Image (cartoon, rainbow, N blue to C red):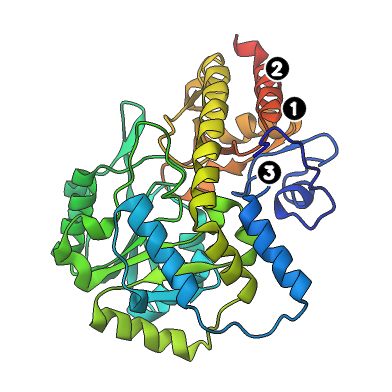
Amino acid sequence: MNFDEIIDRRGTHSSKWDMMEPIYDVSPEEGLAMWVADMDFRPPACVSQALQSMVDHGIYGYFGDDAAYKAAIGWWMKSRHGWEVDPAAIFTTHGLVNATALCIEAFTAPGDGVVLFTPVYHAFARVIRAAGREVVECPLAKRDGRYEMDFAAYDAQMTGREKVVILCSPHNPGGRVWTREELQAVADFARRHDLVLISDEIHHDLVYPGQRHTVMDLVDDRIRDRLVILSATTKSFNIAGVHNGNVIIHDPALRAKFAARFAAMGMSANSFGMIMATAAYSPEGAEWIDALMGYLDGNRKLLDEGIAAIPGVSSMPLEATYLSWVDFSGTGMAADEFTRRVEKEAKIAVNHGASFGTGGESFLRFNIATPRARISEAVERLQKAFADLQ
């Protein structure tokens, strides 16, 4: 668990490091990669050991008998989140973007509306539009420096064409851990407008001290007939490249509808992802996650303090995830100007806020899941790039 170890990822086909120059014109030789949502840390040793066992065996055939895999999921959800999962409710997909796309295909038709609470993870809108559906943006309200939902406004937006609502819980990019009351309001909204509710809970293990994630299925048992939960080990344990995720549907009728689309797409499991996920969902994996969140808490505080020293710039309080949402609106600068300073002067590759939808225009998203020395370097570079404001 040496999170301070600097691991050189350049030249390893890393999207985060090897694509920063073609996309952002930030050289990996002198730049800092703080955009793609993966970590610069090694996964738990138990995951690497499980993979090494596969390599030692030397045969990479089709995966069969997923009982241990599903049992590991069940143990993790029960022990970490107090949630009982029926093994029969679990579908394994090639990651959660794939899972989202399958849900769009299963529960909507071309031209239907899909509701997003924006700004939100940009891949949602991408797959919705690619499927020929309409993105219905319900902007989050910013109150006291953090996001809240405004259902009176959202109710007025609904036209009847909407069939699905996607919730990001915990929220990416705002870092909110939604309260039980807020989740109940989402469930009520879905029922009022007869929407299938897809709750993407991929960040549910990445919650900071003093916060607690609530699984949507535990909020209100009346929503099971319309509830789909997405989960994965990939963000939690830094194994995103295996593209392994789960769609969990307890309602039999809703499950059958998804299963039909799942079968039609010829889906089958990636053996590497199944083995690695089974190893991660273990006591060793739990110990690693606890240590990780302690380390990230230090990174979070260091970045927040550095950002707060720049006049007109503020970071949204981070309750979960390793993705800091930084607001530059107080500088009075246009987006192209503050982005230029971050990328060209500070030489930091970050996600542009506008890509997350309405409400993100004055923000940039910074990935803090990197050794602390790099966070210190990022703070120093940012303060220098905005030194004229101080």
Q: CA distance from mark 3 to mark 1?
A: 23 Å
Characterize the local packing of mark 2: few (<14), some (14-19) or many (20 or more) Cα atoms within 10 angstroms: some
Query: In what element is the residue under mark 1?
Result: helix
Q: Quadrant of the C terminus?
A: top right
Return the residue at label 1. Answer: 345
Three-letter code for the amino acid on which mark 1 is drawn: Glu
Say few, some or many: other residues with alpha carbon within 10 Å of mark 3 (under 14 / 14 to 19 / 20 or more).
many
Where is residue 74? Give x, y as percent.
38, 65
Q: Position of residue 126 (x, y in %)?
A: 51, 63
User: Mark 2 near mark 3, Cβ–Cβ under 8 Å?
Assistant: no
- Which of the two residues, 41 or 337, is positioned nearer the viewer here? 41
Disc 2 or 3, which lies upstream in sequence?
3
Which mark identifies residue 384?
2
Does residue 29 appear to the left or right of 26 in the view shown? right
Q: Amino acid at mark 2?
A: Lys
Q: CA distance from mark 2 to mark 1?
A: 8 Å
Is the residue 159 above or below the residue 361 in the image?
Answer: below
